């Protein structure tokens, strides 16, 4: 019918995690998914089980911690990750459904420990991170098909990771990335435009991840349906000190941890701010210079938390894709509070597919560009 509204079609693709072989395509209702720079994204939804045939298909295709979940929007991939939990439910009428939850592919690294000692001397920090992921995939059963970005940063680091600490690889990469003069990273899932192959790519950005050649202009009122501008004072700190590993080698004496130099924002206190203390722990760091670098980085990012605006846009009226992560948008707001025309980088993307009575929307999380 002329003038009928066209809505995007979403599908859930269930694959074997290690081989990416397609196991089944199944309906997924109540879908919600997000992706981020700097933290693990998530997806959730419900698979209806109306009959025995569908029940058998779901039983064969869905196995938490072994199944990959890809979410397609029309003909493109918008999200990829690992299905971690499932819950079969029955309502009062006996209707069955399975609720599933998944995390982006980087969540795998939170389930893998470093069980050998690794030492790096004067090594580019991105090469150190890559070597940790290569260790994960070189172990028997550990290859989930993550490919590598070959970027380097020019920042050389010395690191020793001891197998006795049994550290999780995700934590090691996050700590390395968040040190002073660090980097950003994520595992991006996308469809190769030339081959049509599903790709899991370890992506780095130094000092940050940037994508896109042209900016998108977003207006409120306009395609921006709503926005939030949170300011959180609970995490603010104007003094900082970090704690490292114990330096005591004599078990007969009291154990004392390595401590960073104390950092104090004297200008804050002189301007009338109350003293607000912050701290962070690095139980495996044994080098003073490394601990001091962590403390300075944590103070810059955690001591004065960034304001992260969030805007909700109508996807039907906005050119958008998951490739927007790392891209710059121009946000223009005119209302009683704001007269704004500024550029922001997209660091998070949360999508709500259309449901009955609800339009297709995306929430963008922003930081100053």
Image: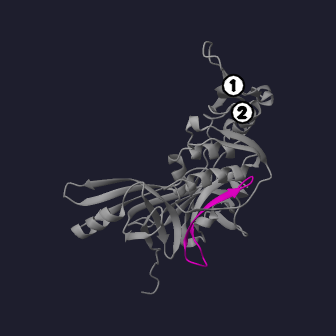
**Is residue 211 in sight in this rendering?**
yes
Q: Is residue 156 above or below residue 324?
A: above
Query: 106 or 303: which is nearer to us?
Result: 106
- Classify mark 1: helix, strand or loop: strand
Q: Is residue 84 above or below residue 273?
A: below
Tell me where residue 90 appears, x and y as whole percent.
24, 55
Residue 258 marker: 1
Location of the C terminus (image quadrant): bottom right
Residue 253 covered by magenta stretch: no
**Is residue 222 in sight in this rendering?**
no
Query: 12 or 239: which is nearer to us?
Result: 12
Q: Residue at x 64, y 16 (%)?
A: 250
Q: Quadrant of residue 246?
A: top right
Query: 236 or 296: which is nearer to us?
Result: 296
For disc 2, the marked residue is 291
Residue projecting furthest to the bottom: 2
Q: Residue at x 75, y 41 (%)?
A: 158
187 relative position to 23: left or right: right
Q: Specify start and end residues of the magenta stretch as a single range.
A: 190-208
For the rendered model, the colour scheme is one colour
Give neighbour class at mark 1: few <14, some 14-19, many 20+ (Cα, 10 Å): many
Reading the chain from its start, which is encountered first: label 2 or label 1?
1
Q: CA distance from mark 2 to mark 1?
A: 8 Å
Residue projecting furthest to the top: 252
Tell me where residue 28 appears, x and y as whole percent.
38, 65
Question: Number of callouts in the render?
Answer: 2
Tell me where residue 2 appears, x and y as whole percent.
45, 87
Contact flag, marks 2 and 1 (Cβ < 8 Å): yes
């Amino acid at each position: 019918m002329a003038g009928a509204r066209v809505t995007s079609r979403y599908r859930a693709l269930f694959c074997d995690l290690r081989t990416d072989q397609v196991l089944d395509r199944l309906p997924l209702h109540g879908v919600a998914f997000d992706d981020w720079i700097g933290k693990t994204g998530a997806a959730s939804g419900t698979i209806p089980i109306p009959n025995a045939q569908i029940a058998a298909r779901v039983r064969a295709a869905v196995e938490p911690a072994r199944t990959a979940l890809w979410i397609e929007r029309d003909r493109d991939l918008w999200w990829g990750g690992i299905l971690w939990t499932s819950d079969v439910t029955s309502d009062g009428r006996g209707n069955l459904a399975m609720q599933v939850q998944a995390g982006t592919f980087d969540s795998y690294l939170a389930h893998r420990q470093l069980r050998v000692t690794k030492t790096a001397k004067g090594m580019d920090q991105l090469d150190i991170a890559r070597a940790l992921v290569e260790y994960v995939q070189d172990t028997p059963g550990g290859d989930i098909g993550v490919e590598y970005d070959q970027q380097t940063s020019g920042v050389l680091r010395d690191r020793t990771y001891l197998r006795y600490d049994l550290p999780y690889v995700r934590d090691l990469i996050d700590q390395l990335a968040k040190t002073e003069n660090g980097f950003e990273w994520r595992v991006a899932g996308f469809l190769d435009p030339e081959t049509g192959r599903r790709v899991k790519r370890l992506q780095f950005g130094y000092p940050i991840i940037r994508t896109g050649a042209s900016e998108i202009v977003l207006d409120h009122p306009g395609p921006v349906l709503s926005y939030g501008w949170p300011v959180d004072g609970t995490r603010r700190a104007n003094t900082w000190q970090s704690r490292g590993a114990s330096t005591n080698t004599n078990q007969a004496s009291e154990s004392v941890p390595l401590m960073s130099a104390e950092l104090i924002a004297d200008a804050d206190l002189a301007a009338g701010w109350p003293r607000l203390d912050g701290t962070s722990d690095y139980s495996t760091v044994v080098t003073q210079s490394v601990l001091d670098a962590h403390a300075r980085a944590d103070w810059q990012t955690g001591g004065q938390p960034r304001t992260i605006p969030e805007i909700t846009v109508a996807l039907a009226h906005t050119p958008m894709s998951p490739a927007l992560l790392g891209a710059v948008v121009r946000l223009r707001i005119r209302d009683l509070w704001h007269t704004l025309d500024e550029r922001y980088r997209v660091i998070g993307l949360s999508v709500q597919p259309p449901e009955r009575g609800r339009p297709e929307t995306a929430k963008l999380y922003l930081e100053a560009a």
